[in-house]
Image (cartoon, grey):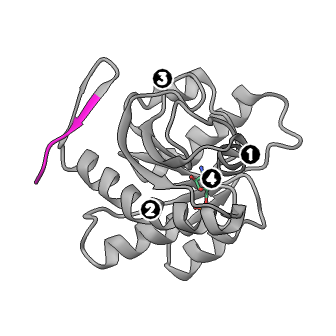
Amino acid sequence: MFCSGRGSNLQALINATRRGRLRARIVVVVSDQPKAFALVRAARAGIPTVVIQRAGVPSRNVFDRRLIAALAPHRVRLICLAGFMRVLSPAFVRQFPRRILNIHPALLPAFPGAHAVRDALAWGAKVTGVTVHLVDEEVDHGPIVLQEAVAIRPGETESSLLARVHRVEHRLYPLAVQSLLAGRLRLRGRSATVRAT
Ligand code: GRF
């Protein structure tokens, strides 16, 4: 898993593996932020961590090569981005075709970018939600695996909406990961279908 921040989605995936809802092993947590709370969560769960900072690295390609090198010993089948605040290079994405998932706190293609919850609220949208999608070479763009709507209530604040969006994220991400790893995801062009168990 790649995380830059508080790692609540990492925790949701850790919990899902413990409860047997996700049959997977999280082999490494990579962060570009040495102080990310996600690293603490990983360490508490006994998951190896790697920090690769962007500062001082001459280019995104060099940074991404370091990411790839960090993954090499772990025989990674799937990369899950969860609040990873760096855009991966096309070269990185091509190394892991259809093997990178991202979770985004809006119904893509609405409200892409780093402030999706705030943007949906500022726009006056009545509905926003959560998207889990495969990562391709464009930002917040790849085929949608799962999506769920979250209503925006009158008087909603950013923090109240964020809390409800997170609750949906923490349920949806383990489901999406389990479906992909279990081979229940079928892709035709942009159209992804998840077969029921
Ligand atoms: C989530 O809202 C996710 O949708 C977005 O970044 C946030 C990460 O939160 N991409 P956390 O670090 O998992 O708590």
Crowding near pointer 3: few (<14 within 10 Å), some, many (20+)? few
Q: Mark 2 vs mark 3: which is more N-terminal?
A: 3
Q: Mark 1 vs mark 4: which is more N-terminal?
A: 4
Q: Where is residue 168 in the image (x, y as percent from the top left)?
A: 44, 62
Q: Please, is residue 51 above or below residue 191 in the view?
A: below
Tell me the residue at 64%/58% (across/down). Answer: 50
Observer-side mark, 3 or 1, equals 1
Q: What residue type is labelled 1?
A: Ala
Q: What residue type is labelled 3?
A: Arg
Q: Mark 4 vs mark 2: which is more N-terminal?
A: 4
Residue furthest top in the image: 189
Q: Where is residue 176 in the image (x, y as percent from the top left)?
A: 33, 51
Crowding near pointer 2: few (<14 within 10 Å), some, many (20+)? some
Q: What residue does disc 4 label?
A: 83
Q: Do the residues labelled 4 and 3 touch (CB within 8 Å)?
A: no
Q: Are marks 1 and 4 in contact (CB under 8 Å)?
A: no
Residue behind label 4 places its C-beta within 8 angstroms of ligand 1: yes
Magenta residues (range):
192-197
Q: What residue does disc 2 label?
A: 168
Residue behind label 3 places its C-beta within 8 angstroms of ligand 1: no
Observer-side mark, 2 or 1, equals 1
Q: Residue 64: which quarter of the image?
A: top right
Nearest the eye: 166 or 2:
166
- Residue 94 image label: 3
Q: What residue does disc 1 label?
A: 122
Q: Position of residue 170 (x, y in %)?
A: 44, 65
The kind of secondary structure element at disc 2 is: helix
